Amino acid sequence: MLYGFPSALLPGPCYTDKSKEKQTAETMTANALAVTTALLLALGFWLMGELKFLIPYRHVLLHQCGSQLLVWFAVLFVNVFAAVYAIQRKFFLKDAGRKLSHVDKQVLAGQLPSPSPLEQEEAD
């Protein structure tokens, strides 16, 4: 996902809180996917350099252990993705709770132009 460009999935220029949360989650998922792919590619290239002595046996290894290697790689990918996603949430969303409590206090004090939930119910 490119930063600074609106997503095609989101409606117009007026974002709701839910769409911003969805956009943040999509951005974090895309970033975690990119970082995971880069890490596993780097690991793969390093392993190819280190395991050159196995080249003559590659057909035997892929035939006998190919499915096990594929499952192992899938489990590794999911674990690295989860770790990267958790690290992003820990370090890049650390002030989200404080910022949201500040907005909540402003709404309850009536300092924001948005209507309170009671006013919305009366209008409906």
Image (cartoon, grey):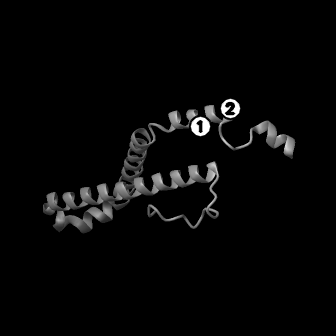
What amino acid does circle 2 point to?
Answer: Leu
Specify the quadrant of the image occupied by residue 31.
bottom left
Label 1 belongs to which residue? 103
Please tell me which residue lies in front, 66 or 77: 77
Disc 1 residue crowd, few under 14, some 14–19, many 20+, Cα 10 Å: some
Helix, strand or loop at disc 1? helix
Number of disc labels = 2
Please tell me which residue lies in front, 73 or 96: 96
Q: Are marks 1 and 2 in contact (CB under 8 Å)?
A: no
Please tell me which residue lies in front, 68 or 43: 43
Q: Position of residue 26 (x, y in %)?
A: 51, 55
- Kindly identify the residue that appears in the image at 74 percent across and 38 percent down: 116
Specify the quadrant of the image occupied by residue 23.
bottom right
Whether residue 122 is situated above or below residue 4 in the rendered picture: above
Q: Distance between the residues labelled 1 and 2?
A: 9 Å
Q: Where is residue 6 in the image (x, y as percent from the top left)?
A: 53, 64
- Kindly identify the residue that appears in the image at 61 percent across and 54 percent down: 19
Label 2 belongs to which residue? 108
N-terminal label among 1 and 2: 1
Please tell me which residue lies in front, 82 or 86: 86
Q: Where is residue 48 in the image (x, y as percent from the top left)?
A: 20, 62
What amino acid does circle 1 point to?
Answer: Val
Going by the image, does 75 lie left or right of 102? left
Q: Position of residue 34 (x, y in %)?
A: 38, 58
Helix, strand or loop at disc 2? helix
- Kindly identify the residue that appears in the image at 36 percent across and 50 percent down: 76
